[in-house]
Image (cartoon, rainbow, N blue to C red):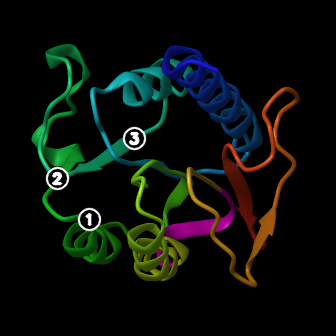
Amino acid sequence: MSRLESFIRRMTAQRDCLDAAADLIAGVPGVVLELGLGNGRTYDHLRKRLPGREIFVFDRQVNAHPDCVPDDGHLFLGDIEEQLPLAAARLGRTAALIHSDVGTGDRERNARLVAVLAPLMAQMLRPGGILMADQAMHREDWRALQLPGGVPAGRYFMYRMAV
C-alpha cells in the first residue's frame, strides 16, 4: 500500500469515528476537546458536525488553514502536558467528547504521553462522554467501544466514560 493510500484510509477511518462519536454524544451535554489542531481539518469537521457545541483546541503552535483556527478563548497553545492541566482547572469535567490525535511514530514517546494524558483527560471527560484517540488508552472507568464498520481494529480507539 502506498503512503497516499494509507493516508486516505486513515482519514476515512478518522472521519467515520468522529461521525460515530458525534452521534454517541447526542444526549450528552458538554464541550468538545480537540487535542492536536494540525492543519485544522478535524476541527473544521467537528464544527460542521456539532454546530451547537463549544470546541476547545490544543496544539503546540498554529499551523492550520486560516479558516480553521479557533478564537483565542478556545485555543490552548503550548506543550500539551502543560496546557491540559490548565484546561482541566478552567473547564472541569465538562467534556462530552475528547478527540486526541497527538501520537507520533515513536512508540516509547507515545506510551509516555498516554501515561501523562489519560489521567488528565479522565478528569475532564464527563460521565457518558466519548474519548476517541489515535493511541490505545486503558482505564477502569473507560469502556472500549466497537469501531464503526470498515474501520480496522487498532486504527483508532473509542471509549465511553462510565456513567
Q: Residue at x 30, y 69 (%)?
A: 84
Q: In which quarter of the image is residue 16?
A: top right
- First in sequence, mark 3 or 1: give its number: 3
Query: Does residue 88 show up magenta in the picture?
Result: no
Query: Does residue 128 show up magenta in the picture?
Result: yes
Q: Where is residue 125 in the image (x, y as percent from the top left)?
A: 56, 66
Marks 3 and 1 in Cβ contact (< 8 Å): no
Q: In this view, does 7 lie above or below 119?
A: above
156 or 17, which is in the foreground?
A: 156
50 or 79, which is in the foreground?
A: 79
In what element is the residue under mark 3? Answer: loop
10 Å crowding of disc 1: few (<14), some (14-19), many (20+) = many
Q: Quadrant of the N terminus?
A: top right
Q: Is residue 21 above or below residue 118?
A: above
**Residue located beneath label 1 in the image:** 80
Q: Position of residue 64 (x, y in %)?
A: 20, 26
Q: Residue at x 50, y 15 (%)?
A: 4
Which numbered circle lies on residue 54? 3
Q: Where is residue 76 in the image (x, y as percent from the top left)?
A: 19, 54
**Residue located beneath label 2 in the image:** 60
